[in-house]
């Protein structure tokens, strides 16, 4: 019996994919297992590979130490507000760069793209001084406002709007539709996949943001999830069970959002990539 080379290649590809999937899932499985054990049990030899019975006690300890339910609400509120406002700004700016003809449009686009190359660390000191002068230190707006104009989002939405027919916009203007109404009623619904991809990207980036909220927020009741988890790492003691459990709980919203909107995310990024 001879093996079909095509079937053999297919089998090898499936085997490689299965091994890759197992390796990818293994760290998350270990996170789930570690979240149900105490600190002492995590350092047993060999380490545990099945869930334990300390899940509820770890949740109570995490809540009492950092108020994790409040922290999750803070992260959710900041990420949602940032996503909505930043998405609207990116869509409006991208539409203007794609469909309006004005002097310096190419230079403005080049400046927007150039900001993507500036390391975030370079902006820390001037941004901190600006927030301090405004009296915004330890406020939510200091975490949200400085990054609302997202250069990646502007570029992505511009690419999405480039392929929209100019004739439809002109027809709407002839029918008496103003620019704002044309944008919201005619143009914006067509680019929902790209807008959905941008929403997922901005939500995940804001949810995972650590350094800037760490600098801006001083009160524990205003901490975001990454900052609160950082406080569990002490100089002489690290609450590994609480840290892993908090990381697991903070990862769940991102996984749910991505699994629900993964089609929009992939189609949106590919759609914006192929437009000239």
Image (tube, rainbow, N blue to C red):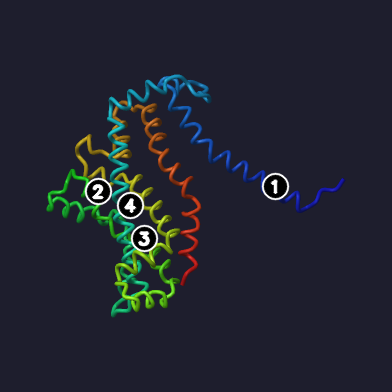
Calculate the distance from the C-alpha at mark 1 to the C-alpha at mark 3. 39 Å
Mark-to-mark CA distance, 4 and 1: 42 Å
User: Residue 110's spot in the image, x, y percent?
Assistant: 34, 71
Viewer can see residue 239: yes
Q: Determine whether the residue tagged by mark 4 lies in a helix, strand or loop.
A: helix
Q: Quadrant of residue 192?
A: bottom left
Q: Is residue 110 visible?
A: no
Q: Is residue 257 left or right of residue 128?
A: right
Which residue lies under the disc numbered 3? 153
Circle 3 SS class: helix
N-terminal-most mark, 3 or 2 = 2
The answer to which image quadrant residue 184 occupies is bottom left
Which badge, 2 or 1, is on the more N-terminal residue? 1
Q: Nearer the viewer, residue 109 or 181?
A: 181
The residue that appears at 53% across and 35% down in the rendered structure is 26
Q: Which mark is residue 226?
A: none
Looking at the image, which residue is at 30% across and 61% down? 89
The label nearer to you, 3 versus 4, is 4
CB within 8 Å, label 2 to label 1: no
> Residue under circle 2?
143
**Eye-nearest disc, 2 or 1:** 2
**Spot occupied by residue 248 in the image (x, y as percentages of width and height):** 42, 34
Residue that numbered label 4 is attached to: 83
* Percent of width and height locating residue 183: 34, 67
Query: CA–CA distance between discs 3 and 2?
Result: 18 Å
How far apart marks 2 and 4 lie (CA) works out to: 13 Å
| Circle 1 residue | 12
Q: Give the mark nearest the N terminus, 3 or 4.
A: 4
Which quadrant holds residue 207? top left
Tag in front: 4 or 1: 4
Residue 209 % position (x, y): 32, 46
């Amino acid at each position: 019996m001879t093996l079909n080379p095509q079937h053999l290649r297919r089998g090898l590809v499936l085997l490689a994919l299965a091994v890759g999937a197992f390796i990818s899932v293994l760290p998350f499985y270990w996170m789930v297992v570690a979240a149900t054990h105490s600190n002492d049990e995590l350092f047993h030899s060999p380490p545990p590979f099945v869930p334990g019975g300390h899940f509820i006690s770890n949740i109570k300890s995490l809540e009492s130490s950092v108020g994790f339910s409040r922290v999750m609400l803070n992260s959710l509120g900041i990420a949602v507000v940032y996503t909505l406002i930043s998405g609207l700004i990116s869509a409006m700016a991208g539409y203007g760069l794609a469909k309006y003809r004005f002097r310096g449009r190419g230079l403005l686009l080049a400046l927007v793209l150039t900001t993507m190359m500036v390391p975030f660390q370079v902006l820390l000191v001037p941004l901190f001084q600006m927030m301090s002068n405004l009296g915004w230190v330890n406020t939510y707006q200091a975490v949200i406002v400085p990054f609302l104009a997202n250069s990646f989002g502007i570029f992505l939405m511009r690419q999405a709007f480039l392929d929209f027919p100019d004739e439809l916009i002109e027809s709407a203007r002839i029918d008496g539709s103003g620019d704002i109404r044309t944008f919201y009623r005619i143009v914006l619904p067509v680019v929902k996949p790209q807008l959905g991809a941008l929403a997922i990207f901005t939500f995940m980036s804001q949810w995972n943001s650590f350094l800037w909220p760490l600098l801006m927020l001083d009160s524990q009741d205003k901490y975001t999830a990454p900052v609160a988890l950082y406080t569990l790492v002490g100089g002489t003691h690290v609450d590994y069970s609480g840290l892993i459990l908090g990381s697991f709980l903070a990862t769940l919203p991102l996984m749910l959002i991505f699994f629900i909107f993964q089609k929009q995310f992939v189609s949106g990024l590919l759609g914006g990539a192929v437009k000239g």
